[in-house]
Amino acid sequence: MSQENKNDKSYYVIIALSVVLVLMSATIYAISQSGSEKDTENTISMSGYAEQKVVPDTATLRIGVVVQSATAKEASDENAALMSAVIAELKAMGLQDKEIQTSYVSVYPVYNYDNAQTITGYSASNSVQITTTKLDNLSEIIDRSTAAGANEIGSISFSVSDDMQKQLREDLMNEAVADASSKATTLAKSLGVEITGVQTSSVSENSGSRVYYEYDMATAEKGSGAVSTPIQPGESTVSMSVQVTYYIE
């Protein structure tokens, strides 16, 4: 056989194989599309929702010391001494190391911009974040911290702990699923069909936004005395959403 005939034969073989591959790909695509349509036909999807109001069991607040002095070392040393006294007072109240976390430390120059940019001193800052479930001690934590030398109290926020959310999860799940089922049953009845089973479901949880309180140091100093700082945690919302897909016929 001549070389030219061999080349022609190879060319036709390649074309035939290409056609077979195209047909196979088209068949596989058609089967997958058919399966996908089967998965979505004869189903309805419905969302369910449930929520509960709870009193938060966790508080987070920031306690700090800010000091200004002529040199960076003086400011840093004075700040360290005061902050050590504050932390010692917090631990004396029973707070553990895991409840006290350093959140910010800095030493920076203080400038005077009246005539020319000149350094007039240095400011040293140090703050810790307190996270505790001892909500009854919050007023004492603030009062004793300020008495020990703290002069910065950040926003106090209240939230629901993971442990409390776990306790609520089962009840919320049942309520949310019941809500979705009730809606689906009503819709199926309106459509004249019957629910025969559940295809899929998904769950979304929300612990609610934090409740924030501002502590005004200036106001606290004016009213300092025997009266302790009043702190109320209020309420927080824990919610759950579900999305359920039902088979119908």
Image (cartoon, grey):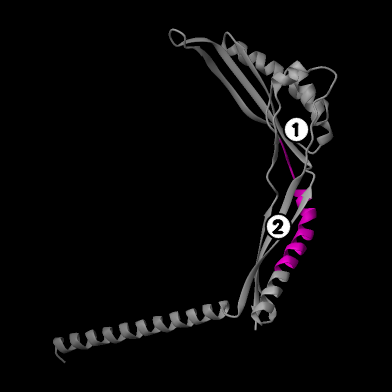
* Res 161 seen here: no
**Magenta segment range?**
157-180
Give residue 95's quadrant in the image: top right
Q: Secondary structure at mark 1?
A: helix
Judging depth in this view, the residue of 161 and 225 nearest the camera is 225
Eyeballing the image, is 92 above or below 182?
A: above
Q: On the image, numbered disc 2 is attached to which residue?
A: 240
Label drawn at residue 97: 1
Residue type at tag 1: Asp
Residue type at tag 2: Met
In the image, residue 231 lies in the stretch drawn in magenta:
no
Local crowd at mark 2 within 10 Å, few (<14), some, or many (≥20)? many
Q: Secondary structure at mark 2?
A: strand
Local crowd at mark 1 within 10 Å, few (<14), some, or many (≥20)? few
| Residue shown at 70% from the left, 70% from the top | 183
- Residue 119 spot, x, y in % from top left: 50, 10
Q: Quadrant of the N terminus?
A: bottom left
| Residue shown at 40% from the left, 84% from the top | 24
- Residue 14 spot, x, y in % from top left: 27, 83
- Residue 36 spot, x, y in % from top left: 52, 77
